[in-house]
């Protein structure tokens, strides 16, 4: 890709802001290193962090390429319908994770999501999930790294491969040095830096188009038309910008894809597992849900502004791809100084996203693959070293997968395809196994495997022209739904034919058998009524529903 036309006009002040940020990031990594004495310190921060830290890290870990570049691209391509990824496609699942699933994750003291599957089902299911998760994380890390490289290419005019390698080296440094604590404390810092970078883009963009009313008028006159300003209009059919019906949005995105991502993706769940007690762990995703409600203001609105101000946006190749909506606005709208803050915020978002993928990978590789199946019974120091080498391996592989992501003009479509393939069947296996104690270990393995293959087959048949969908996103919605149904059918067929696990083996892992202490080691200050996970969760879901009213 030729980035010459996208080159940002940075000056000394902008570079100074950027340099200060990188120094701070590395400093946080070195500061966190002092607290690392065991593998649990490196991989799970010693399970010692307060809820507000883990909550902000939880949402920041998701503020990577998917959120910033991908959602702005979707805002330009699909309009206001992109809010579905937040208000129905994130918040309810985040609340469900905190209220319903975290007691089982945190209470069972598992170190990862795959380890839960080993306890609930068996070792083959555990290994299958560990391997598929590891593959998914390096693929998604490549997306974040590619987006990071795009901005560095625009910033410095470097070739894409140089920008990818340099961006990877920065992330590698602070995770290898500071472990999960280094990643989490940097994610808290990055959350505020990201907002500081995106808010000026949004505000100045709105001023340029004449405010909210001016933007709405301009969108009506764009290729999206009136449909670009509504979330649910014309979803009884596929005659809408998203090309999806309401059933695909509600079931495919709002249930299977959303719950599959937020409740079983260890890159996110790991932040909650590092919390200091059960209450903090449960509140972690719920605290994150509140800023998640408002993130569309700084992602979708800039996407719409880019749509109506950047002539020719939406090309398949070159600088005018939808993926470049945010960098193009930064180039066209921001004065020096503010530009430096915005570039820093954008780079912070990609680093946060990639760090989440890499820290999730190194934990699962070390605990669930290497320790469980390759080298058992070694010292804790040995596994700590393996974790650091796994971090290096994840970044190196991520460099390769970044070039896969570069083949997609809208990386959101690529991400959704990955979620429907890896997260949807995993969620179905989890949720059925958690609520149906009779589901056998053998049924768990075959359900997960065949659900994954069903999603993969749907994608390949769509790409081969055998099955027709209106868009890549519609395929991902239906692929996720097909995976979920496949898991349920396979579980229903195999479970009566195979032996279940004994009740005593399942205590604390499934509903109805007890074994989960919801209060556990809760501190006195965590027990007050306004910190109730249920209360906070209900308010967050109610707000998500109310936010739909103006854009219905």
Image (spheres, helix red, strand yellow):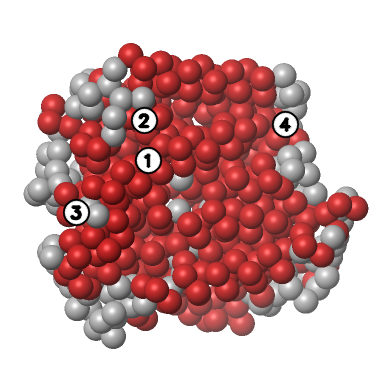
How packed mark 1 is, by other alpha carbons closer than 10 Å (few <14, some 14-19, many 20 or more), is some
Instruction: Mark 3 or mark 1: name the one nearer the start of the chain.
Output: 1
Query: Residue 416 appears in which quarter of the rendering?
Result: bottom left
Q: CA distance from mark 1 to mark 2?
A: 7 Å
Q: Is residue 257 visible?
A: no
Looking at the image, is mark 4 or mark 1 nearer the viewer?
A: 1
x and y percentages locating residue 482 in the rendered image: 38, 73
Image quadrant where one finds the N terminus: top left
Residue holding disc 1: 200
Looking at the image, is mark 4 or mark 2 nearer the viewer?
A: 2
Q: Check disc 4 and report its element: helix, strand or loop.
A: helix
Looking at the image, is mark 3 or mark 1 nearer the viewer?
A: 1
Query: Residue 326 appears in which quarter of the rendering?
Result: top left
Looking at the image, is mark 4 or mark 3 nearer the viewer?
A: 3
Q: Check disc 1 and report its element: helix, strand or loop.
A: helix
Q: Is residue 487 left or right of residue 35?
A: left
Residue holding disc 4: 41
Q: CA distance from mark 4 to mark 2?
A: 37 Å
Q: CA distance from mark 3 to mark 2?
A: 22 Å
Up the image or down, 523 lies above or below 36; here it is below
Which residue lies at the image location 82% right of the left edge and 65% below the top edge? 529
How packed mark 3 is, by other alpha carbons closer than 10 Å (few <14, some 14-19, many 20 or more), is many
Q: Is residue 335 left or right of residue 466?
A: right
Residue farthest along the bottom direction in this orientation:
236
Residue 307 marker: 3
Residue farthest along the right direction in this orientation:
524
Instruction: Mark 4 or mark 2: name the one nearer the start of the chain.
Output: 4
């Amino acid at each position: 890709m030729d980035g010459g036309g996208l080159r940002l006009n940075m000056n000394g002040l902008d570079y100074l802001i950027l340099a200060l940020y990188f120094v701070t990031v590395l400093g946080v990594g070195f500061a966190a290193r002092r607290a690392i004495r065991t593998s649990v310190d490196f991989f799970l921060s010693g399970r010692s962090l307060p809820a507000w830290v883990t909550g902000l890290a939880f949402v920041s870990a998701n503020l990577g390429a998917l959120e910033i570049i991908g959602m702005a691209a979707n805002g330009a391509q699909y309009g206001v319908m992109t809010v579905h990824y937040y208000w129905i496609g994130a918040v309810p699942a985040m609340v469900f994770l905190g209220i319903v699933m975290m007691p089982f994750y945190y209470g069972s003291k598992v170190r990862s999501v795959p380890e839960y599957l080993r306890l609930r089902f068996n070792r083959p299911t555990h290994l299958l999930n560990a391997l598929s998760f590891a593959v998914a994380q390096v693929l998604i890390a490549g997306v974040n790294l590619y987006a990071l490289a795009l901005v560095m290419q625009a910033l410095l005019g470097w070739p894409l491969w140089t920008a990818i390698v340099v961006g990877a080296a920065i992330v590698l440094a602070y995770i290898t040095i500071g472990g999960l604590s280094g990643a989490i404390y940097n994610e808290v810092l990055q959350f505020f830096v990201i907002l500081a970078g995106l808010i000026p883009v949004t505000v100045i963009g709105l001023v340029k188009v004449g405010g909210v009313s001016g933007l709405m008028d301009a969108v009506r006159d764009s290729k999206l038309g009136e449909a670009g300003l509504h979330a649910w209009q014309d979803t009884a059919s596929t005659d809408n910008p998203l090309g999806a019906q309401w059933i695909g949005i509600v079931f495919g995105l709002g249930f299977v894809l959303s719950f599959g991502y937020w409740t079983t993706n260890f890159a996110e769940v790991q932040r909650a597992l590092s919390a200091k007690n059960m209450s903090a762990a449960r509140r972690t995703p719920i605290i994150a849900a509140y800023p998640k409600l408002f993130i569309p203001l700084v992602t979708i609105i800039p996407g719409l502004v880019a749509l109506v101000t950047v002539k020719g946006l939406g090309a398949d190749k070159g600088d005018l791809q939808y993926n470049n909506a945010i960098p193009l606005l930064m180039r066209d709208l921001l004065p020096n100084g503010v530009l430096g803050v915005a570039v820093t915020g954008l780079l912070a978002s990609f680093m946060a996203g990639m760090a989440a993928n890499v820290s999730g990978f190194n934990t699962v590789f070390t605990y669930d693959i290497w320790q469980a199946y390759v080298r058992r019974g070694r010292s804790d120091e040995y596994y700590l070293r393996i974790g650091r080498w796994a971090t290096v391996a994840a970044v190196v592989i991520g460099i390769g997968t970044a070039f896969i992501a570069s083949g997609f003009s809208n990386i959101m479509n690529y991400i959704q395809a990955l979620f429907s393939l890896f997260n949807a069947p995993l969620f179905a296996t989890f949720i059925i196994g958690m609520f149906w104690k009779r589901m056998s270990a053998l049924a768990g393995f075959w359900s997960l495997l065949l659900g994954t293959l069903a999603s993969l087959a749907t994608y390949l048949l769509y790409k081969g022209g055998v099955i027709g969908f209106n868009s890549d996103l519609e395929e991902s919605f239906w692929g996720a739904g097909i995976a979920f149904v496949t898991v349920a059918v396979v579980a229903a067929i195999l479970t009566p034919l195979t032996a279940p696990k004994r009740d005593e083996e399942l205590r604390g892992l499934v509903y109805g058998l007890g074994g989960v202490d919801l209060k556990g080691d809760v501190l006195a200050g965590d027990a007050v009524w306004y910190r109730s996970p249920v209360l906070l969760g209900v308010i967050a879901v109610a707000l998500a529903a109310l936010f739909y009213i103006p854009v219905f």
